[in-house]
Amino acid sequence: MKFELLRHTPGCKKLILIFSGWSTDATIYGDICVDGWDLAVVHDYSDMQFDLYALKGYSTIWLFAWSLGIKAASAVLPSELITGAYAINGTLRPVDDEEGIPVAIYEGTLNNLDKRNLTKFRRRMSPDAETFKSLFDRDFSEDEIESLRTQLASFRTLTYNGNLPWRKVFIADGDKIFPPENMKRSWDKMPVETVEMKGGHYLPIQQIVASVIPDPVKVGGKFHSAIDSYDNHATAQNNIATHLSQLLLDNCEPNPQSLLEIGPFTGMFTRKYLPVLKPEEADFVDLFPIEPFNLAAKENYYCCDAEKWIENTDRIYDMIVSASTIQWFSNIGEFISNCRKHLKPGGVLAISSFVAGNLGELDHYRPAPLHYPSKEDYQKWISANFSGYKIETEEIVMKFSNKRELLMHLKHTGVTAGGNATGTKISLPENFDTLTYRPIYIVAEV
């Protein structure tokens, strides 16, 4: 396997890792650029050896595997290194009459591989003539053809190394390489979200990457634009803030020396707990400037990415709190671990977020809804870092008079930031009138 680092910033700990499709290389991924992330492409499966040292130094790795790259990635990558995995037009059983490319077609491609047939194959994986001409129309030498034949043969006997944390699979309705019905049949056996798309075997990877990696600036901008209307329309969020503050007050001693809040935004949660706890010093970290709360004896404000800030600060706290914010983070497990490092002995972490199924009514109408971890995921992260903890989940069902009222709720609370990162507007049916929030509450002690 060849590993090519296309974008690299010294000290960067986040990596977009692409396992490319057979017969393709890194040249088709040059337009992928996400601020704060490195980009690497694995291709050329002449041998199935991968040097894991190439991933050293990355604490957050999001895998995007396309076509036969799905099987290749699952064969060489340890699951514990991958934060989240996304499959694009392929399966874990790529040579299979029911769950992959039918055996006869696969064998026919292998046995009849030459320049002409390879060109036909690459035309079939292109959604249109323009894509073929711009990305896949090239000559191959006889040596390259022989290498590709060897690679294709090796996938028939490739075995798995472990179960990667697959989050979503993207399936194109016009795929002429992997039958869409076979892909659906294969992935339906696993707890993986399926996103059905229009297109061919090659899908615009840049758009998929942009749709699933939250851009903190864009997300924060959506919420910041709703700052004046948020408190009057965020009924569910207010209920969540009230419940979390009560859990915090019930399980903590007042007058801590130091407290950190992540993502206070309008102060909806802040104003519920701070006057009662009365910390000597309170720090607040948010992406955008916020007005001082003037509720603690001393207050410090930091305008930056909280994930980066908590990783790099040298401050130690009695309490770290956050309400309805960390679902946007790229590595929630690492964030929780970093919080533990910045709490004193006996310190408390109190957070709320959301679990799988949150705003599930919208999922059918959004190209790639935000991935929400399960309650079990949170329990795993918390139990690995804290000696004692309480975890609760809740379901808040909101009924609206009509679709317009529901859409106004989304707009005035900034929740539309969760639709997708591409800016595509969602279209809902006229009778759409229900939203379900699924919050999780955690209070943990060092």
Image (cartoon, rainbow, N blue to C red):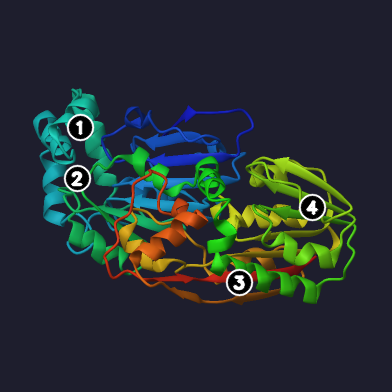
Mark-to-mark CA distance, 3 and 1: 49 Å
337 vs 5: above or below: below
Contact check, label 4 and label 3, Cβ < 8 Å: no
Contact check, label 3 and label 2, Cβ < 8 Å: no
Asked whether, in this view, residue 102 is left or right of residue 3, the answer is: left
The number of numbered discs placed on residues in the rendered structure image is 4
Mark-to-mark CA distance, 4 and 3: 28 Å
Mark-to-mark CA distance, 3 and 2: 45 Å
Asked whether, in this view, residue 212 is left or right of residue 343, the answer is: left
Viewer-nearest of discs 3 and 2 = 3
Which of disc 4 and disc 2 is earlier in sequence?
A: 2
295 vs 176: above or below: below
Q: Which residue is mark 4?
A: 342
Q: Which residue is mark 3?
A: 239
Going by the numbered disc 3, the residue's amino acid type is: Asn
Res 378 quadrant in image:
bottom right
Residue 415, position in %: x, y?
Answer: 48, 56
Q: Which residue is mark 2?
A: 200
Which of disc 2 and disc 3 is earlier in sequence?
A: 2
Residue 137, position in %: x, y?
Answer: 18, 26
